[in-house]
Image: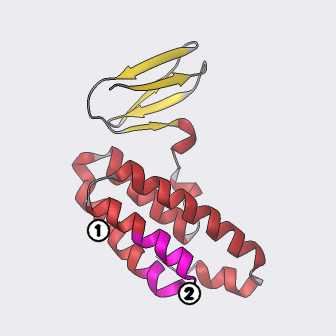
Amino acid sequence: MALKIWLREGEKVVVNGAVLVALGRTRLAVENQAAVLREREIMTPEEANTPARRLYFAAMMAYIDEPARDRYQDQVVLLVHALLSAIQSDAAKAMVVSFARHIAAGEFYRALGDCRDLIAYEATALERAPAESIQACAVLP
């Protein structure tokens, strides 16, 4: 079954590393295996400014940049270890473990979904944390 994507005019999608821009309302059907990210799922390096966001960025790059996948997967492993040692919440640890399982199985898109949940959890935790805790999080790789 084909993956169906609807795009608004000017919306971007990355397919196997190529950035495509819709020149009008567009409907695409992807009929084979491909690394596909919609614009709202793409993170820039500047947006990777927290531990969970850095993990998302490294996994996203491993997903869409197959020639450099090994390098990004090495970063993912380091970031997963750092997060697991820094996180105290069992729920957050479970999100990281689920993410790691998907990465190990080559299910990058599913791993990114887990990481989006982790980013949301992190944002909530950082809102409640005192300023010094936020600065401590900044030192993670």
Residue 1 - label: none
Give the residue type at disc 1. Asp
* SS class, disc 1: helix
Label 1 neighbourhood size at 10 Å, few (<14), some (14-19), many (20+)? some
Is residue 87 highlighted in magenta? Answer: yes
- Asked which quadrant contains residue 138, the reply is bottom right
Q: Main secondary structure of the magenta part?
A: helix
Q: Residue at x 42, y 34 (%)?
A: 14
**Residue behind mark 1:** 74
Question: Which residue sits at x=34%, y=49%?
Answer: 63
Of all residues, the one furthest to the top in this rendering is: 24
Q: Furthest-front residue in view?
A: 1
Task: Provide residue 22's location: percent of width, then percent of height.
Answer: 52, 19
Please state the extent of the stretch shown in magenta in the rendering: 82-97
Q: Is residue 46 left or right of residue 32?
A: right
How far across and how far down the image is residue 96, in percent?
45, 71
Residue bearing the label numbered 2: 88
Quadrant where the image shows the N terminus: top left
The amino acid sitting under disc 2 is: Gln
How far from the left and from the top, in percent, is residue 93?
49, 77
Instruction: Give the residue at x 58% y 68%.
Output: 50
Spatial CA distance of label 2 from label 1 is: 23 Å
Left or right? Give the position of 57 relative to 78: right
Do we see residue 60 in this rendering? no
Q: Position of residue 137 (x, y in %)?
A: 60, 80
